Image (cartoon, rainbow, N blue to C red):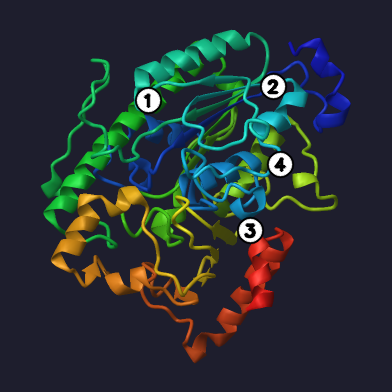
Amino acid sequence: MLRGCLIAVLTVFITVPGWAAERKNVLLLIADDLGMEVGCYGDRVAKTPNIDALAHSGTRFTHAFASAASCSASRGTLLTGLPTHMCGQYGHAHAEHNFHSFRQVKGLPALLAPAGYKSGVIAKLHVQPREVYPFDVEYGGNGRNPVQIAAQARKFFADCGDQPFFLLVGFTDPHRAGKGFANEAKYPPEVPVVRFDPRTLSVPYFLPDQPEVRTELAEYYQAVARLDHGVGLVLKELENARQLENTLIIFLSDNGIPFPGAKTTLYDPGIHMPLIIRQPGQKPGITCRAMVSFTDIVPTILDWCGVKPPPPAGKKGYEWPGRSLLPVLESENPSGWDTIFASHQFHEVTMYYPMRAIRTRTHKYILNIAHPLEYPHASDLWASPTWQGILKRGDRFMGQREVAAFRKRPKEELYDLHQDPHELKNLAGDSSQAKVLDDLRRQLLDWRKKTYDPWLVKEIHE
């Protein structure tokens, strides 16, 4: 039963009257730097039985996209429903980077609290300030330790009693550690160690086929397997708490694989993400081909919880950028889901490179707002054996992309995704593509205006 204090606010926040006697919980599982290297997404190397099982019991989205390809920025979008340039989480929240979401913005804990929800976060949160993300319970600890994470989830479920909850589990895997992927660290004996033979791996098209790359990929896949074990343990705790059939489960990653050419870029390896949603009572095993954005996550959660949000950032009459995914969970090819947008400003504070992008099923257009600058590297990617090998050898290509083209980009990039799915041939200067280019420019500009993009001032000044 919901607490009495919740009943008083039902008429204000609850749009579906009838669920007052029914708990509707939310479990949001966020992987850190996981790309599409998941078994249920066709990766034959990855060992992800628990994530695969979740997909088989729910809906697997084939065309889900992060709004930003950087940790804090993406999480700001995930928890506010607003593009990073609108919520203000321009880059990393920690240490000297110290980016903040705008204080007038409300994150999911704040949006759900008036409806009686208890909110908790385990391990990685990576956004600030607390007034925007006022979680009731914050567990620290090692985000790579599946056993510890599961124990914290068990305590949170028990402590909630009859109160509905929103729990975010922020895994640290498979993010890089100071060196490698933390596979050499000590973990509880029940955590399986799954090793991979570098010689058997397929090297992504955006990376060179070199020994150090294969070694790093093998280490990455080991961290992915540890993540999967953690997902399984948390889901088991949810089942043991008898809340599995009351809880909307969402699994995704914040941004792409932590290698040059993916993470921090708006190319597909940086923003094309796994997304699995399981709604209690839904038809299982659905593969949905709707093009969805992570700006859709907040509307989905609020829809499930029956909560009507206020205008974002206090802007009256403004429509939220995203929309609920609940109506398409059992649809394979829903109509009207064919376009997504992306936004980037920073990764670390030293990495200023604002970009905007629109992607349809056939094309992608990227606007590099500060194109005279050289494209900056995240410190962990720059220090990686993969990138250092490219530099030491003086490689002309990193996989199929020219190193020079990766480091120095034009103002506009246009790709025909049917003919060029790897986004290697820029058609922005091709006169035969002028109509497509103009149309995507117009759509992107319209979106930027609707989302109050501060970087629009450069369009006036320049």
Residue drawn at 42 percent across, 31 percent down: 171
Answer with mark 4 or mark 3, whichever residue precedes in sequence: 4
Marks 2 and 1, Cα distance to the nearest angstrom? Answer: 24 Å
Marks 2 and 3, Cα distance to the nearest angstrom? Answer: 33 Å
Closer to the camera in the image, 286 or 203: 203
Q: Are marks 2 and 3 in contact (CB under 8 Å)?
A: no
Looking at the rendering, which quadrant does residue 101 occupy? top right
375 lies left or right of 460: left
Quarter placement of the C terminus: bottom right
Of helix, strand and loop, which one carries label 3? Answer: loop
Q: Which residue is mark 1?
A: 230
Closer to the camera in the image, 218 or 330: 218
Residue 248 at x, y percent in the picture: 59, 29
Of helix, strand and loop, which one carries label 2? Answer: loop
Marks 4 and 2, Cα distance to the nearest angstrom? Answer: 18 Å
43 lies left or right of 449: left
User: Which class describes the residues within 10 Å of circle 3: few (<14), some (14-19), or many (20+)?
Assistant: few
Q: Which residue is mark 2?
A: 117
Q: Which residue is mark 3?
A: 335
Q: Which residue is mark 4?
A: 105
Residue drawn at 59 percent across, 51 percent down: 84
459 lies left or right of 194: right
Q: Is residue 364 visible?
A: no
- Rendered position, 384 above or below 454: above
Of helix, strand and loop, which one carries label 1? Answer: helix
- Rendered position, 17 above or below 69: above
Of helix, strand and loop, which one carries label 4? Answer: loop
Indicate the amino acid at tag 4: Val
Marks 4 and 3, Cα distance to the nearest angstrom? Answer: 31 Å
Q: Are marks 4 and 3 in contact (CB under 8 Å)?
A: no
